[in-house]
């Protein structure tokens, strides 16, 4: 049986935390930031966790679990 391949785009975008959750970066932080408030831009700089609904798809792309 061949090895499972990790999705290359997913491994660049997601990171596994110490407790087994998956961290992600927030969207809307790449361009056209002049109209956005400083507070909003600062908040988008932090990482978030992947939602429960998307967890299965992301784990499959990263080849985590079964």
Image: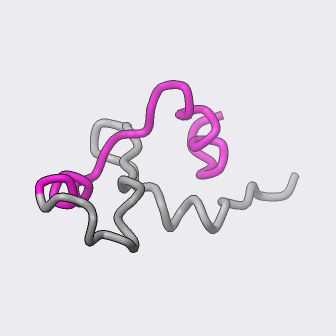
The percent position of residue 52, horizontal first and vertical second, equals 48, 26
The answer to whether 29 appears left or right of 42 in the picture is right
Q: Residue furthest top?
A: 52
The percent position of residue 65, horizontal first and vertical second, equals 58, 37
Q: Which range of residues does the magenta coloring cover?
A: 39-66
The answer to whether 1 appears left or right of 5 in the picture is right
Give 34 or 5, whichever is nearer the viewer: 34
The answer to whether 26 appears left or right of 65 in the picture is left
Q: Residue at the spot x=67%, y=60% of the render?
A: 7
Give 29 or 51, whichever is nearer the viewer: 29
The answer to whether 61 appears left or right of 47 in the picture is right
Residue 6 appears in which quarter of the rendering?
A: bottom right
Residue 57 appears in which quarter of the rendering?
A: top right
The percent position of residue 54, horizontal first and vertical second, equals 56, 33
Q: Where 39 falls versus 60 (above or below)?
A: below
Q: Quadrant of the C terminus?
A: top right
Q: Is residue 47 magenta?
A: yes
The percent position of residue 17, horizontal first and vertical second, equals 31, 46
Q: Residue at the spot x=53%, y=33% of the render?
A: 55
Q: Is residue 35 magenta?
A: no
Residue 58 appears in which quarter of the rendering?
A: top right
Q: Residue at the spot x=45%, y=31% of the render?
A: 51
Q: Residue at the spot x=20%, y=53% of the render?
A: 40
């Amino acid at each position: 049986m061949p090895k499972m391949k990790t999705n290359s785009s997913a491994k660049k975008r997601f990171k596994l935390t110490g407790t087994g959750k998956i961290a992600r970066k927030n969207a809307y932080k790449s361009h056209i930031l002049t109209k956005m408030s400083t507070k909003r831009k600062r908040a988008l700089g932090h990482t978030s966790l992947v939602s429960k609904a998307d967890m299965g798809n992301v784990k499959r792309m990263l080849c985590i679990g079964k």
